[in-house]
Image (cartoon, grey):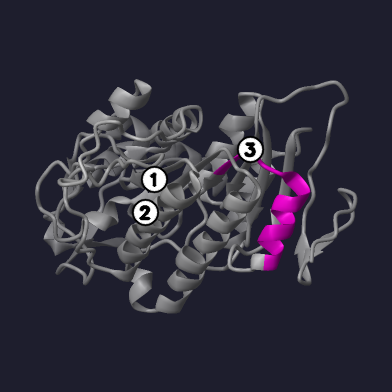
Amino acid sequence: YIVWVTYRAQFCIKGKACMMFHRRQQGVSFLMKVLVTGAAGFIGMHTVIRLLNDGHEVIGLDNLNDYYDVNLKRARLTHIGAPNQFSFCEGDLADNDAVTELFQSHRPQVVINLAAQAGVRYSLENPHSYIQANVLGFTNILEACRHYDVENLVFSSSSSVYGLNTSIPFSEASSANHPLALYGATKKANEMMAHSYAHLFGLPCTGLRFFTVYGPWGRPDMALFLFTKAVLAGEPIDVFNHGKMVRDFTYIDDIVEGVVRLVSKPATADETFDTSAPNPAASTAPYRLFNIGNGQPTPLMDYIAAIEDATGKKAIMNYLPMQAGDVMTTSADTTLLGDWVGFQPDTPVAEGVARFVAWYRDYYNG
């Protein structure tokens, strides 16, 4: 159950403490009412701030789990603040009753589903958390969108779905049927589940295949965070596959720009869709898939060099073999994104890394 009370008090979802930042200004009409799941996450926080700055009313949902430092998640919520058009609730997507009550209470017009159990390597240790969050949780979102007349569902997928595909750059029209870890498999499942709801119920669904997102307020389990922390402390960093890896590092502001543009342009049916040679990125239903990547793949050693330049310190490298579930190279073809919303990410890696390092030093008083 959910009990909504005042800001200084608490409300609960099945006994869990929640914060309430909800305010309404009389006579103010917001452009859209948007539910953002994973609102205390890295991409979620930045997306919420952008939507609020654009004048939308935003409901944020997050379970504040301990996959990584909960204090960082709470600090992100503090960074969002408590503007009049923002509400936050602590709750779990896997709790269908809580999700249903949230939709009943707020009736969002648009849903941006960014909540997920992230991390390729962690999926080797704790697979059940991925099924709970990424499959069961996403099912609850789809059902709520269906029953509460949501006009547009935008959801996060991942470049991890490409798996064994080595045709570079990755195109949405290419095969993504051989993910290498359960994380990628659950994201591929999300795409297929969304398509079924688009087909059966006419729910516009847009899936976003993110490519190695980085930037200020980033996740502590990501390479940039781990490397920066170690370099500044004079400690060694683990460099997998002996540094012979390439990633399409994508700056957070570019990710958010792509998300908000796709919120404003819901998926539509592809009138040219050929059922005898189906394009995975489109459908006869209102369904689309888009890569959101920088389109400029960067060797891992160049990424490390950018961290060295930004910190003014040399990295001590501990070279290791490739980890299970990892891939050598990622590279995004963003032609479809550019054609659909007129935008393609382009922030240079050196610039983005420098912004992260500046944030890290400020946040941790480094």
Q: What residue is pinned by disc 1? A: 207
Q: Is residue 106 magenta?
A: yes
Q: Reading the chain from its start, which is encountered first: label 2 or label 3?
A: 3
Q: What residue is pinned by disc 3? A: 109
Image location (x, y in percent) of residue 105: 78, 50
Question: Which residue is painted at 62% across and 58% down in the image?
Answer: 71
Q: Reading the chain from its start, which is encountered first: label 3 or label 1?
A: 3
Which amino acid type is marked by label 2? Answer: Glu
Picture quadrant where residue 125 is located: bottom left
Which amino acid type is marked by label 1? Answer: Gly
Image location (x, y in percent) of residue 200: 45, 52
- The answer for how far apart the CA atoms under marks 3 and 1 are is 17 Å
Contact, mark 2 vs mark 1 (Cβ under 8 Å): yes
Image location (x, y in percent) of residue 121: 32, 69
Q: Residue 233, can we see it?
A: no
Q: Is residue 88 left or right of residue 182?
A: right
Question: Which residue is painted at 21% across and 72% down in the image?
Answer: 324
Span highlighted in magenta in the image: 97-111
Q: Split into 4 quadrants, where in the image is the N terminus?
A: bottom right
Q: Residue 60, can we see it?
A: yes
Q: Is residue 107 magenta?
A: yes
Q: Main secondary structure of the magenta part?
A: helix
Q: Residues within 10 Å of mark 2 (few under 14, many from 20)?
A: many
Q: Is residue 117 left or right of residue 336?
A: right
Q: Secondary structure at mark 2?
A: helix
Q: Residues within 10 Å of mark 1 (few under 14, many from 20)?
A: many
Q: Reading the chain from its start, which is encountered first: label 2 or label 1?
A: 2
Q: What residue is pinned by disc 2? A: 191
Which circle marks residue 245 in the picture?
none
Question: Which residue is painted at 11% across and 44% down in the image?
Answer: 168
